Image (cartoon, rainbow, N blue to C red):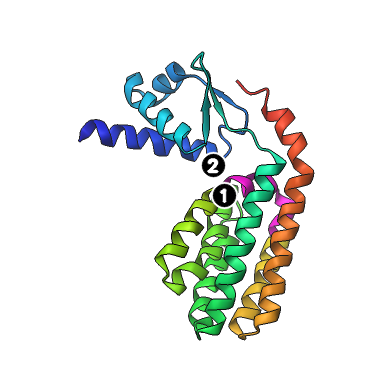
Amino acid sequence: MRKDNLASGVYERIKKGILSLEYPPGYILQERNLAEELGMSRTPVREAVHRLSQEGWLRVNSRKNIQVRPVSSSDLREVFQARKILERDALELLLATGLAREAGRKMAAMAGAMNESRGSLFSFITADQSFHSVLFLVLGNSVLRKFWNAVSEEMIWLGMLAMNEKRYDDVLAEHGRILAAVEEGRKRAAREALLEHLEKTEDILLRKIDDVSSSYGRGS
């Protein structure tokens, strides 16, 4: 049991490093260096790396080189395509079932958390995803939530790549428009505000992706 807990702890630590861009796309990780950094043997590190490679976050080649998955425009488009379908339909279902008030209250709390976490990019992006996750939490559909959870971690990672200090105000304003429409039960306005927000984020990422891939691909 202790061994499993140790490997799980290493897994969480490496995954957070990937999502927070401590280990950016294309970055080369060394099993030995990770073990030394974490102060443990290489066995739990190897188990964690294996799990992350199965999930698609790491790539391990025949020479045992470990690389954080690079970003590609095709992957990005697929993630946003899935996200638009999930969030759009969840939003419309929520507004159709009289859950707008509850959703609005929870989204307002998450918007406040985002504003308070402006000094930490990772905290801001995590709160950003919590804002969007409200749709699925309030609906209470466990199947939809599973699909969303798979997309959400990708969006934390991609959100970190898309964000900079200049975009804090824009994101908060875009969320504010979504929130206002939800609170007022305006289905069409909420849908348009949500899709506009997602399309802006996707466009920013598509424009940045070449620079990200070239600069991070040299990490070691």
102 to 214, vertically: above or below: below
Percent across and percent down for residue 134 are 50, 68
Residue at 58% over, 73% down? 91
Q: In the rendered view of the protein, which quadrant contains the N terminus?
A: top left
> Type of residue at label 1?
Ile
Q: Position of residue 82 (x, y in %)?
A: 61, 57
Magenta segment: 154-169
Q: Residue at x 61, y 58 (%)?
A: 83
Q: Name the residue that disc number 1 marks.
A: 156
Q: Quadrant of residue 107?
A: bottom right
The residue located at (69%, 38%) in the rendering is: 72
Nearer the observer, 39 or 63: 63
Q: Which residue shows up at 51% across the image and 58% down it?
A: 148
Q: Give the SS element for disc 1.
A: helix
According to the image, label 2 marks what residue? 19
Say which quadrant the C terminus sits in. top right
Q: Of helix, strand and loop, which one carries label 2? A: helix
Q: CA distance from mark 1 to mark 2?
A: 6 Å
Does the magenta segment cover residue 201?
Answer: no
Foreground pick, 116 / 38:
38
How far across and how far down the image is residue 109, in percent? 51, 70
Does residue 43 sit above or below 92 in this rendering? above
Prevalent SS, magenta region: helix
Q: Earlier in the sequence, mark 1 or mark 2?
A: 2
Identify the disc placed on residue 123. Answer: none
Image-based side of 48 in relation to 27, left or right: left
Which amino acid type is shown beneath numbered disc 2?
A: Leu
Circles 1, 2 touching at the beta carbon (< 8 Å): yes
Residue furthest to the right in view is 207
Q: Is residue 120 visible?
A: no
